[in-house]
Amino acid sequence: MKPFDYVRPATVTEAVAAAAQPGAVYLAAGTNLLDLMKGGVSRPDRLVDVTHLEGLDGIERLADGGLRIGALVSNADLAHDADFARAYPAVAEALLSGASAQLRNAATVGGNLLQRTRCAYFYDTASRCNKREAGSGCDARGGENRTHAVLGWSENCIATHPSDFCVPLVALDAVVEIEGRDGRREIALDELHRLPGDTPGRESALEPGDLIVAVRLPPAAREFAAHARYLKVRKRTSYAFAVVSAAAALRIENGRIAEARLALGGVAAKPWRARAAEDVLKSVAPTADAFQEAAWRALTDAKPSGDNAFKIELARRIVVRALTLAAAGTPARLPALPASPFASTSGAIHA
């Protein structure tokens, strides 16, 4: 591992100033960063430790009915918060489907949003990767790429974003609060992550020194609590990233879908909001035919980036199943195998 400086600022303002310097990165739990450093993929000159900063580790119910989640809240603490799980069941289910219990206990909300792709060629420093070295090429294009992107990819990069948590957050119009050199601002989570285009090394809208301080869910997100699910297909039921996933949330009134939210994971370099599919579902009955049409609309622009054409059909089927599960109603208990197609309805009480 490359030698680095370690900085422990006392305030958010000091942290931003320290991290704005070239070669600096933030350190929270480090569940992704330290692996990258050990493998020589990430070689920072300075770690800016933010784990002790005040005001970043709380879950706050807002007066308008929304929710503000501090960036240092752990994935486990958020998922197991009973009020949170009742109000945002698909988000809790997504959190509990990711990694292992030990990692969820350590990993933070802010770090989850910014975790790096798990593309094997990105992790292998002997392989060409435009994310690591601009202009070097993308060995994934001609390599083992069955789990790579089918939406939004470019010739420069076909990697996917690995977060489960981000998928239902994008569907529910979550907002990210950012502290930067010019003060605080906010951005829709759907706009935080960038598609690769010609610059795959630029993965987010963050500028040097920018620190995510909170994630906020708007009041309207609670309106989907009765019909919201997250479904994830992976190579094994536990401790694996999604091959394809989907978050589906419906607001059903008088037997019809008043509003639908749908997002996919494992298909692109960012959580993929399927707005065209949402439009198809508005004001229609929650039927199998409607869900099939929505699935086709969600994947209209999909195309293989290699040996992964199967992912397009798989994604369509996962969309249909996630919508079907959501229409049936959020279960009174989180499934014992959260987000798994093999899950029963018995599990942890959240109602």
Image (cartoon, helix red, strand yellow):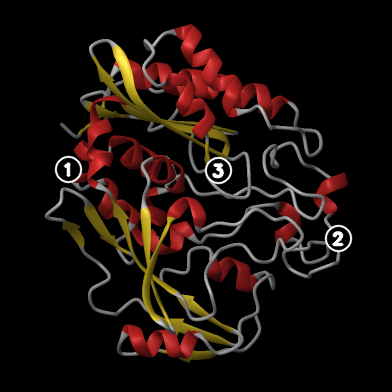
Q: Which mark is residue 328?
A: none
Q: Which residue is mark 2?
A: 137
The picture places residue 66, in percent across and down from the top left corner, at 21, 50
Say if mark 2 contacts mark 3, CB within 8 Å.
no
Real-space Cα separation, disc 1 to disc 3, in angstroms: 25 Å
Say if mark 1 contacts mark 3, CB within 8 Å.
no
Q: Is residue 222 above or below residue 72?
A: above
Q: Quadrant of residue 347?
A: top left
User: In this rendering, does residue 1 appear at all?
Assistant: yes
Residue at the image position 47 percent from the left and 18 percent from the top: 321
Residue at the image position 52 percent from the left and 70 percent from the top: 206
The picture places residue 287, in percent across and down from the top left corner, at 42, 8
The picture places residue 343, in percent across and down from the top left corner, at 39, 23
Real-space Cα separation, disc 2 to disc 3, in angstroms: 25 Å
Which element carries disc 1, helix, strand or loop? helix
Q: Which residue is mark 1?
A: 82
Q: Amino acid at mark 2?
A: Gly
The picture places residue 319, in percent across and down from the top left corner, at 51, 24
Marks 2, 3: nearer the viewer: 2
Q: Residues within 10 Å of mark 2 (few under 14, many from 20)?
A: some
Q: Amino acid at mark 1?
A: Ala
Q: Which residue is mark 3?
A: 241
Q: Amino acid at mark 3?
A: Phe
Instruction: Tell me which numbered mark, 1 or 3, is placed earlier along the sequence.
Output: 1
Real-space Cα separation, disc 2 to disc 1, in angstroms: 47 Å
Say if mark 2 contacts mark 1, CB within 8 Å.
no
Residue situated in front as seen by the camera: 194 or 149: 194
Specify whether 310 is left or right of 181.
right
- Quadrant containing the N terminus is bottom right
Counting every numbered tag in the picture gives 3
Instruction: Tell me which numbered mark, 2 or 3, is placed earlier along the sequence.
Output: 2
